[in-house]
Image (cartoon, helix red, strand yellow):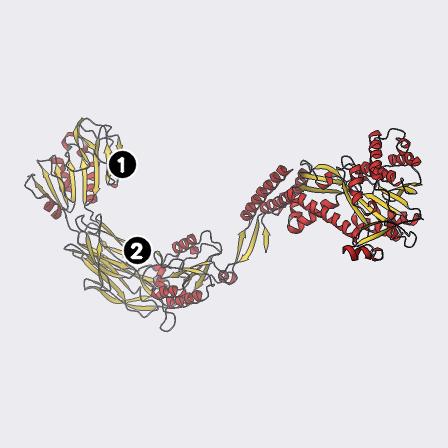
Amino acid sequence: MIQLAYPVALLSLLAIPLLIALHLLRPRRRRVVLSTTTLWQAALKDRERGLGLRRLLRNLSLLLLLASALVLGLALAGPQWLTRASEGADTVLVLDVSASMKTRSGIGTTRFDQALAEAADIVDGLPREGRMLVMTSGRKALLRTGFEADRDALRRVLAQLRPGDEAGRPREALALALSLLRGREQGRIYFLTDGAFDPDVDPGSPQVVFRVVGAPARNVAITRFDFRQELASDDRFQVLMTVRNYTDAPVVVPASVSLDGRALYRGSLELEASNEQTLVLPFRGRALGRAVGRIDVDDDLAADNQAFAAVNAGDPLRVLLFTRGNFYLESVLEALPDLDLIKREWSPAEDIARLARIHDVVVFDGIAGPRLPPGNFLLVNTVAPGLPFSDAGRVAQPDVVGRGPSALMRDVDLTAVHIDRALRVVIDEPVPGLQRLFWSPETDLALALLDDGLKLVYLGFDLAQSNFPLQAAFPLFFSQSLEWLRPRGDGFVSTHIAAGSTHSIRVPSIQTRVIMRMPSGDATTLEVKGGSLLFDATADTGIYRYSVGEVARYFAVTLTDARESDVNSRWAPGERREQLQPAGNGAQALVPLWPHLLVLALVLLALEWCVWTGSRGSA
Amino acid sequence: MAMKSLNAPAGGDPVFNDEFLRKLQRLELLARKIFRGLLRGEHTTSHRGRGLEFSDFRRYRPGDDFRHIDWNIYSRLDQLFLKLHTSEEDVTLHLIVDTSASMGFGEPSKFDHARRLAAALAYIALHNLDRVGVSAFAEGLGAALPPIKTRHHMARLLTFLGDLPCAGVTRFDSALRAFAMRTRNPGLVVLISDLLGAGEAQDGIEALRHGGHDVVVIQLLAESEIDPPLEGALRVVDAETGDELEVTVDPELRRLYQHRLELLLQEMESFCRRRGVEYLRASTAIAFEDVVLKYLRQGAHLR
């Protein structure tokens, strides 16, 4: 069935009489009187008998002109072809693997089992030429296959899928699925879910077909579990645990909280229907180790009946300072918290490579150091050999005229800084890891370099010959420089992340491997480059223990998501589902026809031109 | 003397000018030697039993009456010859000239050529024949000159021919049928036409034969009809009917045209042969006296 988007454009067909008039005005044939035309008529018939289209070709020029005008007029009217989804339409299957899909739904089955059964039906019902892409929607949207026509391969992939302990983000998954079908209006997206999300997840696209599985369920969940340090106290901490009853009846829930096996709480919580209760458990002492909270309840979703947190002891930053004495520099380093400062005078006999390995940061203050090995270095008023920049003399009273966008310069105000004398450096070879921090017209005054295991901050003037130490920016610059040289993100505070999210692990630049032990007990070795590692295999809740060299640290992965634990479907798109037809089974789509008509009109015009010029030539 | 008695028609007709008359007289001298048996022996077949006096022999040709074969010669020479006899009755030569518009084409025109040819035949025929009549036809039977007996009336004949118009549509069937019905004394009919419109022409010739006439057909064509000098996109107009036709003439179409013309000519020739009608074909590019001498010499009547 064809619909017209702009029927009024059909008025353009009134131009056809004009075309006929123009055609008639073309130069006429030469008139010749003959004794008889009978023989010519017979000859023409002979020729037309041989070439059946000759008769048509006699007025081909006009016919082509009229046809092109007709097609253009139709194109302007915006015809659209209302068609059923073609046999070869692509399908995207989005499978919800969030924690709520673990909810029991019947005896021995979960919502995810039901979703898999639905997925199998969809695979079985694929059109003969249809292709399907399988992706999962957890905290992240992950593609599990490409567009695959092999039904067995699709079934194998589906059989390997399991729900995680993560909170779902279906909005991102559906956006990705729609982007995969961009330009394929007949494609369909099947989202197999339990509907435990906000209605605004629906992108409103007619391509998305929701298949909601599961039934209302009973659930009591730990929705918050965390450490916090009491104000103005170094050794007083609190553990917070919130438990929510999602059922419509009061429940009594046995609960317990432990820290490295030491019980912080054991008791029962009385929870009203659709209500929650928060435990605040103070304790004194160094907060180190792994905390576990549990509730002992027989509900339909077990994944949120436990929660985890980890607290790592913060190691002090070990800084080695080579200086002949610098009051300002020593003062600022000693003032920074959790920093062990070692001052020495430089000797060429020092094994700089070993020193770099055993210290977090090595500082050279006004001392011409050696060629620098891999490690973290801070150069003040000196330049080391082998760097991409070199000493080129001195500059008197340089003005700070520019600053770079580096994180090292965050909130560092240099407007009042005056420098009496500075090193003049020349960048010999630009390298990608070299950042300009701030500079004068004559030279760079501060640089940062990250190059193949070497991290370095360069400050190109004597602190005593500037008013920089008197500025608020001074300690900030050094604090941020040391944090950049040796990040301490895994230190003091408790570390727990939501299941499915990515955990950033910072390691000394000299370390190249991290051994990760999962909650299941399985261990894996991960390669590290550039001093940091992004770890995202966090679908399961629990304590993750990793080793960097001799140091062991923890982080906890927990669900504790009130929205995810609300396992009762809050959005059942039944009405939409009735309206939509699955792809290949009669789904309808509007296919615009005007581009095809436009191309056809151009081809007809080109043909008309050829015929017209050809006939003029022969005449 | 005959040559002295031939005068140009009054008004200085460009067709029958002095040069034509001189040619005609030369032609008469040439024809005299072979004109002795003109038409007499030939017409013994159609007027059986009337002429019994032996005149001449000629070779047998398909269509001749077996009864006139001289079997004695056959037994000696093993070849078929006919015995020709002199007719004792008067024979009238009827010259029928096509004056339709299509005859006006060619250089010289077929019409002029036909008139000169008719005049030449009449002039030569009057040498021995009793009577020569001339009729014009186009859409219908047109002006007619009653049979004349002597060359003294030759000027009248030329004037008649010179005054004929060249116009109208050809209707062979009705015109020739009217001639056959109107003519009381059957004779030799010489039809001079381009015969464009062959289907009707055959019906007309058939009507002449049924009228008891012996028929000779001289088909005249212009060179521009045999090899038309046309090229490109044209709107051709039929001179007789006014019908228009758009054609784009290219070598292929010209070849098809010539093929059609050849079929038309062959069809007419075949028809004439089947009906025992003498058929002669001539182009306007050939001088009328050459046609008379060359073509009529090949014909049965001038043996």
The C terminus of chain A appears in which quarter of the rendering?
Answer: top right
Q: Nearer the viewer, residue B252 or A79?
A: B252
Q: Which residue lies at the image location 87% right of the left edge and 34% below the top edge? A: B162
Q: Compared to A91, does A465 lie above or below?
A: above
The answer to which image quadrant residue A59 occupies is top right
Task: Tell me the element at label 2.
Answer: loop
Is residue A414 in view from this perspective? yes
- A73 vs A135, nearest the viewer: A73
Q: To which chain does the residue with label 2 belong?
A: A
Q: Please name whichever residue, A215 or A359, is drawn nearer the observer in this view of the structure.
A: A359
- Which disc is residue A501 wearing? 2
Q: Which mark is residue A249?
A: none
Q: Which residue is mark 1?
A: A404
Q: Position of residue B17 (x, y in %)?
A: 84, 30
If the image is split into quadrants, where does the N terminus of chain A sit? bottom right
Residue A62 in picture, x, y percent from top left: 65, 43
Residue at mark 1 to residue at mark 2: CA–CA distance: 31 Å
Q: Nearer the viewer, residue A253 or B172?
A: B172
Dot 1, crowdedness within 10 Å: few (<14), some or many (≥20)? some
Q: Residues within 10 Å of mark 2 (few under 14, many from 20)?
A: some
Residue A600 in the figure: left or right of residue A191: right
Secondary-structure class at tag 1: loop
Amino acid type at mark 1: Gly
Q: Earlier in the sequence, mark 1 or mark 2?
A: 1
